[in-house]
């Protein structure tokens, strides 16, 4: 449950078809576009693609940023827990984590699960947010891919290459960490900032040499012949977070709802980890992707709930320092104030 949407996945299918015909077709406060060699070909809107209200009972509506198909609503549905929400919940679907936190910063979203990098960029841009829950992801759920025809077989061969990545997403930090550990910098490559649908087409058409992304795009691209050059077993942080707006957690009624919501979502994560085939089958139905892709994605992208701790701030501080040293955020600020243990 990283950051995708059915509209994005449907667009991905269309983009593949366009690429096959020869056509070149997952952030608040982001300053990534200023990096040397960066090219922003596709922007992500902070407006949701679709929205659905579920739940029952009284109380204010909890506004959840989501990614339809493999996000919280789909996960709760698969686990049989959607009807357990004892208050109204509005799920608004986005393409990736960065636009979700843009919407949260504007006040239209109360809480959402995103990867490790979006909160760093959102906070650097002045967003008033709090990390209130976390999961550790399977390492195979992050990867950098090369096309079937590419001669790239290791990260050290990326120097001088054009790489697609979604700006400000978890893949952004994965890529930065991978480059640094292979004695490269963002100035040694050309970055194409693309949303997943456009990146899929770009990799297949050859307009980029590699693509840093997450599940199920890894599994989808692999099924179409792309090669995994490296995954999260050596690079990135493999954490994702439930991020709430400060306005929501300081509202007593919404804070109570957030605690209940997190407990139910964590149960759904535990169910999905022990039922990857069932979770993957629903994932396939809701996205239109082949079941072999989504079931593999469900097995790769397991998510183990953990309590927020002092290590959470330490882990995110590592991202802050890395992005600052790379010249991708304007200041090396303290992340500690953006972490809350009140919802453990």
Image (tube, grey):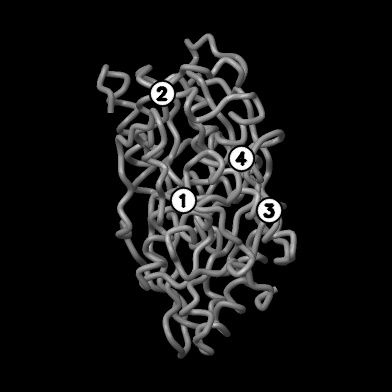
Q: Report the mark closest to the observer, 1 or 2.
A: 1
Q: CA distance from mark 1 to mark 3?
A: 19 Å
Q: Residues within 10 Å of mark 2 (few under 14, many from 20)?
A: many
**Does label 1 or label 3 sit earlier along the sequence?**
3
Tag 1 near tag 2, CB within 8 Å: no
Q: CA distance from mark 3 to mark 2?
A: 31 Å
**Does label 3 or label 4 sit earlier along the sequence?**
4
Residue in the picture at 63% in, 54% down:
316
Tag 3 near tag 2, CB within 8 Å: no
Residue in the picture at 31% in, 22% down:
19
Q: CA distance from mark 4 to mark 2?
A: 18 Å
Query: Toward which corner of the image does residue 174 lie, by quadrant?
Result: top right
Q: Residues within 10 Å of mark 3 (few under 14, many from 20)?
A: some
Tag 3 near tag 4, CB within 8 Å: no
Residue in the picture at 33% in, 57% down:
46
Q: CA distance from mark 4 to mark 1?
A: 29 Å
User: Which disc, if any, is residue 315?
Assistant: 3
For residue 287, side relative to residue 280 (left or right): left
Percent position of residue 128, x then y: 47, 70
For disc 2, the marked residue is 203
For residue 4, side relative to residue 314 (left or right): left
Q: Is residue 326 above or below residue 23?
A: below
User: Which disc, if any, is residue 141?
Assistant: 4
Q: Report the mark closest to the observer, 1 or 3.
A: 1
For residue 344, side relative to residue 330 (left or right): right
Q: CA distance from mark 1 to mark 2?
A: 31 Å
**Does label 1 or label 2 sit earlier along the sequence?**
2
Percent position of residue 218, x then y: 53, 33
Percent position of residue 50, x then y: 32, 60
């Amino acid at each position: 449950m990283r950051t995708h949407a059915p509209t994005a996945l449907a667009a991905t299918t269309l983009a593949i078809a366009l690429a096959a015909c020869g056509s070149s077709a997952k952030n608040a406060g982001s300053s990534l576009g200023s990096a040397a060699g960066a090219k922003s070909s596709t922007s992500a809107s902070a407006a949701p693609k679709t929205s659905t209200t579920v739940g029952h009972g009284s109380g204010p509506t909890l506004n959840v940023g989501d990614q339809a198909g493999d996000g919280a609503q789909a996960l709760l549905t698969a686990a049989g827990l959607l009807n357990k929400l004892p208050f109204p919940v509005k799920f608004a679907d986005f393409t990736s984590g960065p636009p979700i936190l843009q919407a949260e910063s504007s006040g239209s979203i109360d809480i959402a699960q995103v990867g490790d990098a979006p909160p760093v960029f959102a906070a650097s841009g002045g967003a008033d947010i709090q990390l209130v829950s976390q999961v550790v992801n399977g390492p195979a759920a992050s990867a950098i891919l090369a096309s079937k025809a590419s001669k790239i077989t290791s990260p050290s061969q990326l120097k001088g290459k054009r790489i697609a990545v979604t700006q400000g997403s978890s893949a952004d930090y994965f890529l930065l960490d991978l480059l640094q550990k292979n004695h490269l910098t963002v100035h040694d490559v050309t970055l194409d900032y693309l949303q997943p649908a456009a990146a899929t087409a770009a990799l297949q058409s050859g307009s980029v040499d590699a693509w840093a992304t997450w599940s199920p795009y890894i599994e989808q691209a692999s099924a179409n012949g792309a090669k995994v050059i490296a995954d999260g077993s050596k690079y990135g942080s493999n954490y994702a977070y439930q991020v709430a707006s400060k306005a929501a957690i300081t509202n007593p009624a919404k804070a109570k709802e957030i605690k209940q919501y997190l407990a139910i979502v964590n149960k759904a994560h535990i169910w999905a980890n022990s039922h990857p085939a069932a979770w993957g089958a629903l994932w396939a139905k809701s996205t239109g992707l082949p079941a072999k892709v989504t079931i593999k994605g469900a097995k790769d992208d397991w998510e183990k709930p953990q309590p927020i701790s002092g290590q959470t701030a330490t882990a995110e501080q590592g991202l802050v320092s890395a992005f600052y040293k790379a010249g991708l955020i304007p200041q090396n600020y303290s992340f500690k104030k953006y972490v809350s243990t009140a919802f453990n």
